[in-house]
Amino acid sequence: MTGPIPLSIDEHPSLHLGAFVATLPEPLDAMPSPAWLTDLLREDASAPMERSEEIRAAVRDLLRVGGYKPTGRGKPASEYLVRAASQGKLGPINLIVDACNAVSLHSGLPISVVDLDRVAEPLRVGLGAPEASYVFNTGGQEIKVAGLLCLHDADGPCANAVKDSQRTKTSADTRRALCLVWGCEAFAEHTDRAVAWYRELLERADAKCAAFAP
């Protein structure tokens, strides 16, 4: 996929979506995460952002708008990161995802990362259709996304604030990724700061980031 990326966003009462495209000078597999980045995966790492109970509650309310229940195994990905970090189990994956996880952990906002060479235009953000689902890991497990805010491509839903789909996740060959910060209008400034910090981390690691305005 080259050139401008068409992305439409359905009307939503509380979504404040942050979006940008990250382009790497080499395939993702050739760009290991530096130590200063993986250090940020610790819960006690020094970070320019701080999560709060108010933000956690606002994110859950955001996902409830379409009838989805963000609890149990369906809770926002940012909450899983907090638990993993508190147990010392949040380890490195790859440059783009590690930066994503660091920002999500400390901001309290869920973030999606999609390989732009693995999606088909057009792209749209909106609620998942009734009975919609997709596989989210190599084991073939599925998440039901009816009523959940999702990124959709021509083949269906492929990412959301809970779990991203296996078919569009980054891989060793990834060169361009669409990064989506699932923020809330009530915390719009906080969301914008998270986007800026995410971009800053990737640019420090030699990626080029371009703002995305739907």
Image (cartoon, rainbow, N blue to C red):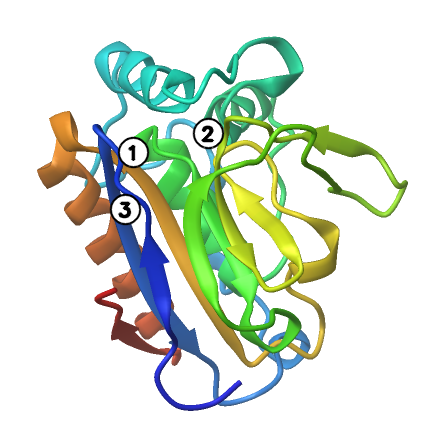
For image coordinates 27% across by 36% down, the residue present is 183
Whether residue 39 is visible here, answered yes or no, is no
Q: Residue 172 appears in which quarter of the rendering?
A: bottom right
In the foreground, 71 or 24:
71
- Quick one: label 1 or label 2, which is nearer the N terminus? 2
Which residue bears the numbered disc 2? 78
Point out residue 40 in the picture as x, y percentages from the top left corner. Answer: 41, 44
SS under mark 2: helix
Horizontal side of 137 relative to 202 (left or right) equals right
Q: Is residue 189 visible?
A: yes
In the rendering, which numbered label is found on residue 17? 3
Q: Please give the label number shown on residue 13.
A: none
**Considering only vertical position in the picture, is 205 above or below 125?**
below
| Image quarter of the C terminus | bottom left
Kind of residue at badge 3: Leu
Which residue is at the far front?
130
Q: Amino acid at mark 2?
A: Ser
Q: Earlier in the sequence, mark 3 or mark 1?
A: 3
Callout 1, which amino acid? Answer: Ser
Q: Position of residue 173 (x, y in %)?
A: 69, 79
Label 1 vs label 2: CA separation? 9 Å
Image point (61%, 45%), residue name: 164
Outermost residue toward the left? 189
Q: Position of residue 120 (x, y in %)?
A: 60, 72
- Quick check: 165 above or below 173? above
The residue where tag 1 is placed is 107
Residue at image point 61% right, 37% down: 163
